Image: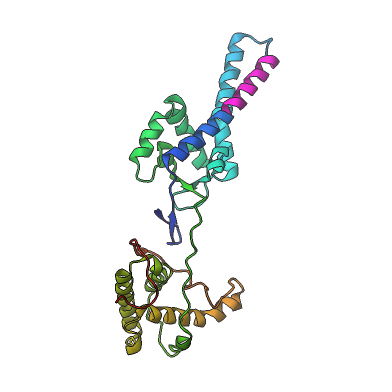
Amino acid sequence: MSELVTGEAVALELRPAKLPSRALAVLIDLIVAVLVYIAVVIGLVAATSSLDDAAQAALSVAAFLLVLVGGPIAVETLSHGRSLGKLAFGLRVVRDDGGPVRFRHALVRGGVGMIEILMTFGVVACIASLVSERGRRLGDVFAGTLVVRERIPVGRAGVVPPPAPELAGRFAELDLSGVPDGLWLAVRQYLTRMHQLQPQVSWSMASRLAADVAARTGAAVPPDLQARPAEFLAAVVHERQSRQAPRYEGGGDHVMSSVSPPAVAPVREENVKAPEAPQGRSTGFAPPA
């Protein structure tokens, strides 16, 4: 994953495209462009048979630039970074801040691409992509763009588990205003992925997060939940969701659910990393034996 920061200071996680998929996408685009170029040349030869050789050569060069250089630029501009090859492999060209590309981005990519792809048969582009951390060729570097994957294999959706029935509403008097957005995000990420962690790691991480939340709220973790920190976190998150439900319902922008509503309002995700998930699965909220 590649973290990009938008102009509104919102962190985006995008998956840069790998070199093989990019190369195959470029190959498809080149095949289509060459077929169109051949058709255009045949049409020009038939239409300009009465012209001299110099005029026919000039028209051939103009057709080359128009089809093999101007064609990809026009397609990327009009499709916002999706050419035929990229559509086939689920790729897209975006700006460094995650936004759609404009004409100037496509123009720079196409101009540099004529040198690093057409004139060097893709050797320079491959070397640049292998050297770049995010797989960018020289055209992407100069244009300030990045090729990312749009179609990512769908995994199991992360759902914040609801608290036990006896814990619902137990923390209604708890002051949650001192808990920062980053901590809420870390808690939510843990709750959605805790079943992917090893039991000992899951319980240790839940204990640390519960201690952080308790320190921010000014109230200690209840004694009966100290051995079950994940249940404490689920109950506190559920309480925060319940308090935010009228705000979302009143705006009409979100549909709240008692099981899996949005855990937090839009937050700044700077310096917040998802916990790594070691191999193994936990069996529930209870700490390991």
Residue drawn at x 50%, y 83% as measured from the top left: 243
Between residue 191 and residue 145, name the one nearer to us: 191
**What colour-coding does the image apply?**
rainbow
Q: Is residue 236 above or below residue 141?
A: below
Answer left or right for 17 relative to 79.
left
Give the x, y percent position of residue 173.
43, 90
Q: Is residue 108 above or below residue 230?
A: above
Q: How many numbered markers are drawn? A: 0
Image quadrant holding the C terminus, namely: bottom left
Answer left or right for 40 relative to 180.
right
Q: Dividing the picture into quarters, in which one does residue 146 lie? A: top left
Answer left or right for 268 relative to 82.
left
Between residue 106 and residue 197, name the one nearer to us: 197
Q: In this picture, which residue range is highlighted in magenta?
A: 33-47
Magenta segment's dominant SS is helix
Q: Dividing the picture into quarters, in which one does residue 221 lie? A: bottom left
Give the x, y percent position of residue 164.
46, 83
Give the x, y percent position of residue 196.
39, 65
Magenta stretch encompasses residue 210:
no
Residue drawn at x 40%, y 68% as measured from the top left: 195
Between residue 70 and residue 238, name the one nearer to us: 238
Magenta stretch encompasses residue 36:
yes
> Given the current orientation, which residue lies at the most extreme front position?
289
Residue drawn at x 41%, y 38% as measured from the top left: 137
Give the x, y percent position of residue 117.
45, 30
